[in-house]
Image (cartoon, helix red, strand yellow):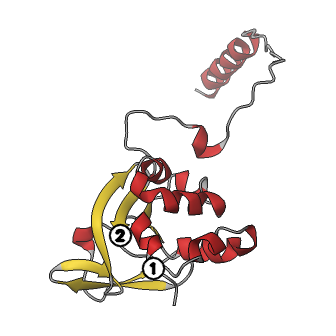
Amino acid sequence: MKKTFLILSCVALGLISCNKTEATTETSTSTETVAGGQEAVVDEDSAPTIVKLAAGNKDLSTLVTAVEAAGLTTSLSNAGPFTVFAPVNAAFDKLPAGTVDDLLKPENNSKLGDILGHHTYVGVIKTEQMTDGQSLGMVDGKNITIKMVNGKPTINGTVNIIATVPASNGIVHVVDGVILPQ
């Protein structure tokens, strides 16, 4: 039995080692730039990313400008999933005069990033999953509180969700106010 096993092993080893394969190497001289990371994946069939969804909505143009100024476009285009509470332009207009222009200045990038992070939750939370008194830890490290008002969820009792739109990398709750960190 041992002798048969030894012979079969030698035959198998011989067949494997006799199998001649040639390795080929191709060198590319192309200078084409290839995008990296998840941004390089193009999927025209599923829902757009949070960033593309916002960019396609004229009522969210101030938010899109802020995301670009803070350098968060790539982050919010990644797989996520994220829940973004996206203030409409009118919400930004309610802030004191000059606030948005001031936040968009390069020297205020960190503050702008914190405010935008206070609108972003890692994970997906749908409106039907929200409960009164629920606390959500936002990207900026601070919490928001869900309060039910007339059976509908609000953020900190003052900011209303006016629309909800699914995205390929999460969900967007369009809101009527800017949620400032406390």
Rendered view: 91 above or below 24:
below
Q: Residues within 10 Å of mark 1 (few under 14, many from 20)?
A: many
Q: Residue at x 41, y 48 (%)?
A: 168
- Which quadrant would residue 116 be assigned to in this image? bottom right
Pinpoint residue 60: horizontal percent, then vertical percent: 44, 58
Rendered view: 128 above or below 20:
below
Callouts 1 and 2 close, C-beta under 8 Å: yes
Q: Residue at x 84, y 17 (%)?
A: 29
- How many labels, in total? 2
Which residue is the site of mark 2? 175
Task: Give the Cα separation between the discs numbered 1 and 2.
Answer: 9 Å
Query: Which element is circle 2 on?
Result: strand
Q: Nearer the viewer, residue 79 or 173?
A: 173
Pinpoint residue 6: horizontal percent, then vertical percent: 67, 24
Q: Residue at x 58, y 77 (%)?
A: 99
Which residue is the site of mark 1? 179
Q: Residues within 10 Å of mark 2 (few under 14, many from 20)?
A: many
Pinpoint residue 161: horizontal percent, then vertical percent: 29, 71
Pinpoint residue 125: horizontal percent, then vertical percent: 34, 68
Q: Residue at x 48, y 56 (%)?
A: 61
Q: Nearer the viewer, residue 52 or 17?
A: 52
**Hey, what amino acid is under mark 1?**
Ile
Residue 87 visible within the image: no
- Which quadrant would residue 14 be assigned to in this image? top right
Rendered view: 55 above or below 122:
above
Rendered-image quadrant of the N terminus: top right
